[in-house]
Amino acid sequence: MAVLTVEHVQAQYAGAQHPVLQDVSFQLGSEQLMVALGASGSGKTTLLNLIAGFTHPQLGSIKLDGEEVLAPSRDRGVVFQDDVLLPWQNVQDNIAFGLELAGIDKSTRLSKAQELLNLVNLDGFGQRHIWELSGGQRQRVGLARALASDPKILLMDEPFGALDAFIREQMQCLLLDVWKSTAKPTFLITHDIEEAVFLATDLIILAPNPGRIVEKLELDFAKRYANGESARSIKSDPKFIETREYVLNRVFIQNGQLNNQKQHVEQV
């Protein structure tokens, strides 16, 4: 199984006085769904872009199975917050688009697209136009497309941020179902604390200015869901609520906003 290794990474934009990320290190391997959580300015998106190969660190290294990450590659599937689907193609062709670019024959790529439609619960939607889909359905297509090339790891950039609460939870459960079925190591960034606690087997909390890891937590809620417990049962568990509040406090402390959060809670 693929192993992603991030070692002492520092990233800084041209002309900036301070780095966006500083001395970030972790490892992501089999049966892990790692979530990076942090306030604005903590470098979550920059970190994902580095792993995807869209940008490069000034210091440190990022390796997948021992090979340096130097550019985007099919071995890293990316799901974006904006689905970036091709509106002139139907659902099936959107999923198979990367395979077409790779020169895979039509029969094989359409068969793979149908397999993935079943995986993301969109059987029967292959011939639909993109504009006929809801936001949640479009994200399902984006997830299927990212999996089409059978990447070694899956990267997700706040994929459910634009969805309403009900659809968001459905998509969280779908992601865990897919993660269980495919065993893909997954790296996801989010600003949603409850989502992070629910999805993560491994949670890294980032502090801003510069972005750095201040705490790593191993959690079991995703595995409990994968083993058959319902999302509602898990999220109402006192242990889940206690963990969520602990993480919330850690994030707000790092962002210097704990007092404001307390005032808000008291007003509510």
Image (spheres, grey):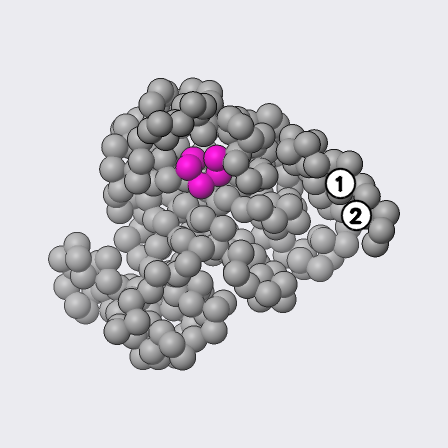
Residue occupying image coordinates x 41% and y 53%: 80
Residue type, label 2: His
Tell me which secondary structure the magenta stretch mostly adopts.
helix
Where, by quadrant of the figure, is residue 146 drawn? bottom left
Say which element carries label 2.
helix
- Whole-number angstrom distance, CA of label 1 to CA of label 2: 6 Å
Q: Which residue is mark 2?
A: 264
| Figure check: 195 above or below 8 | below
Residue 107 within the magenta-colored segment of the rendering:
no
Q: Which residues are magenta?
A: 43-47
Where, by quadrant of the figure, is residue 75 drawn? top left
Residue occupying image coordinates x 75% and y 40%: 260
Quarter holding the C terminus is bottom right
In the depicted view, which residue is nearer to us: 237 or 87? 87
Residue type, label 1: Asn
Query: Would you say the residues marked 1 and 2 are in contact, meaning their CB atoms lie under 8 Å apart?
Result: yes
Residue 45 within the magenta-colored segment of the rendering:
yes
Residue occupying image coordinates x 49% and y 67%: 136
Q: Residue 118's mark?
A: none
Callout 2 crowding tier (Cα within 10 Å): few <14, some 14–19, many ≥20: few
In the depicted view, which residue is nearer to us: 16 or 202? 16
From the top left corner, tell me how far across and down residue 191 is, in percent.
58, 46
Say which element carries label 1.
helix
In the depicted view, which residue is nearer to us: 13 or 31? 13
Residue occupying image coordinates x 68% and y 32%: 256
Q: Which residue is mark 1?
A: 260
**One can see residue 143 in this view:** yes
| Figure check: 254 above or below 145 | above
